[in-house]
Image (tube, helix red, strand yellow):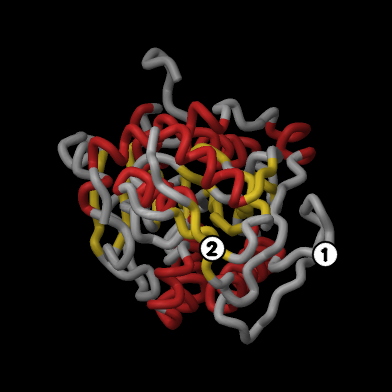
Amino acid sequence: MSSSHAPRWKHAVVTGGAGFVGSHLCSALLAAGTAVTCVDDFSTGRPENISELAGHPGFTLLETNVSRPFTVDEDPDLVLHLASPASPADYLRLPLHTLEAGSLGTRNALELAHRNEARFVLASTSEVYGDPREHPQNERYWGHVNPVGPRSVYDEAKRFGEALSTAHASALGTDVCIVRLFNTYGPRMRGYDGRAVPTFIRQALAGAPLTVTGDGLQTRSLCYVDDTVAGILAAADHGMRGPVNLGNPDELTMLELARWIVELTGSRSEITFVERPTDDPTVRCPDITLARDKLQWEPRVAAEDGLRRTIAWFRAEGDD
C-alpha cells in the first residue's frame, strides 16, 4: 500500500500475534500503515518472531492468555483471532489450553470486536474437514471428524469457534469473517513443532533420517505464508462472512515432499518410515474457487521457491 494513502484499517488486534502466521500478519499490517496490538501468552508463540517489530511506533505487545477477558489501550477496527496451538505436538501437549483458546478465546475476541464495531476474522483450519470423504474440500462440505480422537481438541475447538462466530454475527450483528487455512509453511516455523515441512528440513540439515509416517502416500497442499497472509487480509477487506478456504490446490504426497527437501537441501539423509498418527487425514486439498471468485486471491509463490526460502531461513536461524 502506498504511503500516500490512508491504511484500510487504523488499529488491528492480532491474537496469537507472536506465532508463526500471526507474526507475519503483524508485519504485513504494520507495513500497510495499520497500528497493531499483538496479544500472545507465548505458550507456543516466540518473542523472537516479533523482536524486529518491538521498536516500531505502531506496535504494542499485550502478554496475556486470550481465554481470559482482556482490553486494549486503543479501540480496534479490526480483530484477527489466530491464538491457538496449531501443530499436533502442541495441541496434544496442551489439550485444555487449545480447547479454551477456541472457545473462551474466540468469545473474548468476538466481544472485543463487537464492542468496537470492528471487523472480526477467525483463523479456522482445514482440520474442520477431518479425514475428508470429499476431495478436494469445498466450503459446503461438513467434514468427517472424530469428536473424541486425539486430534479432536484442535478440530472441535475450531469447529466451535466457527459456530460461535456465526451465532455472534446472526444474533448480535458482529461483522464476522471465517477463513480456513490449509497447511501454511515458511520462515519462523519451529523445527520441533511436529509438522512435516519443518521436521523434514530440520532432519535433512542435520543429516538425520527423514521420518515419513505410514507409507507416505497421504497428501497435503502447501501454501507459503506470504500467500496465506495476503488471503487473510483480502478476506478482511472484502466484507464476506465466509467460510472461505485459503490454501494451495497443488497436492503432493508426504513421500514426495521428503524427497524434494532432501534434494533442495543437498542432504545425504535417507528416508525412514514410522507409525502413522491416529486419525491422520489421508488427503488434504482445498477447492479455492470461492477465494478466486470473490477475493481475486490465489497462491503466487511456487512450492520450490517457498521451500528454498524456508530452508534458507532454517540454515540461518537454527531450530528449536
Residue type marked 1:
Arg
What is the distance, in whole Å, between disc 2 and disc 1 at their CAs? Answer: 25 Å
Residue 254's place in the image compared with 263, above or below, is below
The residue at the point 39 percent across, 33 percent down is 266
Q: Position of residue 319 (x, y in %)?
A: 27, 51
Residue 126's place in the image compared with 88, above or below, is above
The residue at the point 35 percent across, 36 percent down is 27
Badge 1 element: loop
Does 220 sit left or right of 306 as displayed? right
The residue at the point 65 percent across, 39 percent down is 248
Q: Position of residue 268 (x, y in %)?
A: 39, 41
User: Can residue 54 be seen by looking at this rendering?
Assistant: yes
User: Can residue 172 be seen by looking at this rendering?
Assistant: no
Does 29 sit left or right of 238 as displayed? left
50 or 187, which lies in front?
187
The residue at the point 70 percent across, 28 percent down is 296
Disc 2 marks which residue?
Answer: 273
Count the labels in the image.
Answer: 2
- Quarter holding residue 35: top left
Does 145 sit left or right of 317 as displayed? right
151 or 8, which lies in front?
151
90 or 112, which lies in front?
90
The mark that comes first in sequence, 2 or 1, is 1
Residue type marked 2:
Phe
Disc 1 marks which residue?
Answer: 133
